[in-house]
Amino acid sequence: MMRKSASFYFSKRKPIARKDRYALWRGAAELSGFNAQERLRVEWMVFYYTAAGENATLTAQHFGLSRKTFHKWLKRFK
């Protein structure tokens, strides 16, 4: 009689899918009831950390706002 391996009796665990921090930021904004303008500011920060590579000038140009305004909100966000 052949013995079956342990993998026959025990199933492999599925990895836990974790959301990235930007998805968590968006989810928190949604749950907090942010209006469209407030959610847009969250998108500024997501863009700043992802697509712009932490470049404030590029982020400000992309969204059509001044660098001073963006830096003000970045300071509040941190």
Image (cartoon, helix red, strand yellow):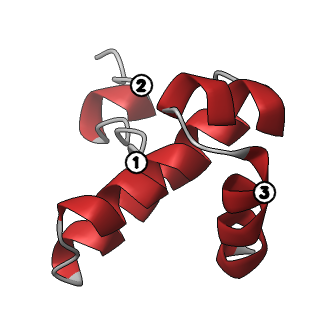
Residue located 72% across and 64% down the image: 74
| Quarter occupied by residue 39 | bottom left
Of pointers 3 and 2, the one earlier in the residue sequence: 2
Residue 52, above or below 26: above
From the viewer's side, name the closer residue of 4 and 70: 70
Q: Is residue 76 left or right of residue 7?
A: right
Front: mark 1 or 3: 3
* Residue 16 disc label: 1
Q: Which numbered marker is on residue 5?
A: 2
Q: Earlier in the sequence, mark 2 or mark 1?
A: 2
Image spot of residue 46 (x, y percent): 55, 43
User: Which residue is tagged 3?
Assistant: 68
Left/right placement of residue 57 relative to residue 76 reads right
Residue drawn at x 37%, y 35% as measured from the top left:
12
Location of the N terminus (image quadrant): top left
Looking at the picture, which amino acid does disc 3 mark?
Answer: Lys
